[in-house]
Image: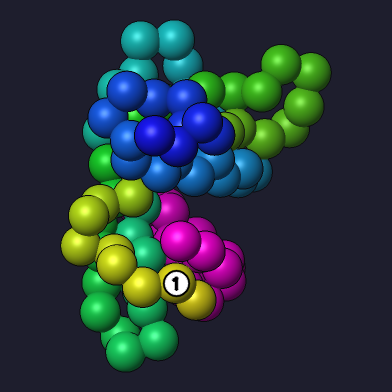
Amino acid sequence: EDVLNFHSDQHTRIMLFATGLEPTPGDSPLLVTVQLEDTQSRIYHLVAEDVRKVPNFDFSQIVVKLPDSIDTEGDFRVRLVYRSNISNKATIRIFR
């Protein structure tokens, strides 16, 4: 058992931070679309589990769950879409 995994389903989560999102209480996390693109241009759609404004800061946090279909590690480009606003792609590195 992985002692560093704090969720019972054993999936890895990523916490992203973004400016320009103005979630209001009661907004569904489904308003945010998160996509990862690997180095072979495969696109993975991630499930947003939580979206909330960070108190006392000008940004929001988005928690997403990595799907089982991501079985490699390395660099990925992440993009957020919120109410038809599309973010720049940022590079993140995933380690397994």
- Which three-letter amino acid code belongs to the residue tagged 1? Glu
Q: Main secondary structure of the magenta part?
A: strand
In magenta stretch: residue 80: yes
Q: Which residue is mark 1?
A: 73
Q: Can residue 25 be seen at all in this image of the molecule?
A: yes
Of residues 37 and 94, the one drawn nearer to the viewer in this rendering: 94
As drawn, 60 above or below 94 = above
What element does badge 1 sit on? loop
Q: Quadrant of residue 10?
A: top left
Residue 35 location (% of width, % of height)? 33, 60
Residue sitting at the far right: 56
Q: Residue at x 66, y 23 (%)?
A: 54
Residue sitting at the far front: 1
Residue sitting at the far bottom: 40
Considering the image in quadrants, where does the N terminus appear?
A: top left
Residue sitting at the far top: 25
Residue 30 location (% of width, % of height)? 26, 33
Of residues 60 and 47, the one drawn nearer to the viewer in this rendering: 47
In magenta stretch: residue 43: no
Q: Is residue 43 left or right of residue 12?
A: left
Q: Is residue 95 left or right of residue 1?
A: right
The mark tally for this picture is 1
Q: Residue at x 25, y 52 (%)?
A: 67
Q: Can residue 64 be seen at all in this image of the molecule?
A: no
Mark 1 closeness class: few <14, some 14–19, many ≥20 residues within 10 Å? few
As drawn, 25 above or below 88 = above
Q: Which residues are magenta?
A: 75-96
Q: Residue at x 33, y 50 (%)?
A: 66
